[in-house]
Image: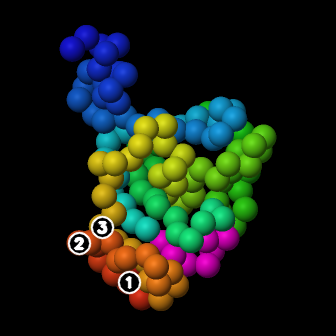
């Protein structure tokens, strides 16, 4: 496979997986290198309010694997596009939590291994098979 074809499939010639994402209007773009350290779903009230959904699917990467372009602002540590308001990520001192819906390609290969705040999970949602189930915050 040539270099440009490899890049189109989310990899670089070095063999490191690259994922890209951004906001709804395209003003903010980001890139992630390598695999996430954690993939999960959270049902806490803060995540519900921040996303406007009954849960939030996320994945964490080391901060060193993350680059971004474009202007963002933060509210309660959660970054969003200043132009369209899309929620994108949560920057922490040594990692970044990415909202999976902000990725350009469907994150079908990122299977959650943990589910947090299940005490708030809707009764009509089934537990995630093979994922750690935490009553509140997973450890």
Residue 134 x %, y %: 38, 83
Residue 27 x %, y %: 69, 33
Residue at 25% across, 26% down? 14
The number of callouts visible is 3
> Label 1, label 2: how many angstroms apart (C-alpha)?
13 Å
Residue 106 x %, y %: 41, 43
Q: Earlier in the sequence, mark 3 or mark 1?
A: 3
* Residue at mark 3: 113
* Residue at mark 1: 134
For label 2, the SS is: loop
- The crowding category of the residue bearing disc 3, from other C-alpha atoms within 10 Å (few below 14, some 14 to 19, many at least 20), is some
For label 1, the SS is: loop
**Residue 88 horizontal side relative to residue 4, left or right:** right
Checking the image for residue 45, the label placed there is none
> Label 2, label 3: how many angstroms apart (C-alpha)?
7 Å
Magenta highlight: main SS? helix
**Residue 123 horizontal side relative to residue 34, left or right:** right
Query: Residue 131 appears in which quarter of the rendering?
Result: bottom left
Residue 66 x %, y %: 47, 42
Check the image and tell me how it is coloured: rainbow
Cβ atoms under marks 2 and 3 closer than 8 Å: yes
* Residue at mark 2: 130
**Magenta-highlighted residues:** 42-50
- The crowding category of the residue bearing disc 2, from other C-alpha atoms within 10 Å (few below 14, some 14 to 19, many at least 20), is few
Residue at 47% across, 88% down? 119
Nearer to us of marks 2 and 3 is 2
The stretch drawn in magenta includes residue 66: no
For this rendering, which residue is in front, 73 or 64? 73
Asked if one can make out residue 117 in the rendered structure from this viewpoint, the answer is: no
Residue at 43% across, 76% down? 125
């Amino acid at each position: 496979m040539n270099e440009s074809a490899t890049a189109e499939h989310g990899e670089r010639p070095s063999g490191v997986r690259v994922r890209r994402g951004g906001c709804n209007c395209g003003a903010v773009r980001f890139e992630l290198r390598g695999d996430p350290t954690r993939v999960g779903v959270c049902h806490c009230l803060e995540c519900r309010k921040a996303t406007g959904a009954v849960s939030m699917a996320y994945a964490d990467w080391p901060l060193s694997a993350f680059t971004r372009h474009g202007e963002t602002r933060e509210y309660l540590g959660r970054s969003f596009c200043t132009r369209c308001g899309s929620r994108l990520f949560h920057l922490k001192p040594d990692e970044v939590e990415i909202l999976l819906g902000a990725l350009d390609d469907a994150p079908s290969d990122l299977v959650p291994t943990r589910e947090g705040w299940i005490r708030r999970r809707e009764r009509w949602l089934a537990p995630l098979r093979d994922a750690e189930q935490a009553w509140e915050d997973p450890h």
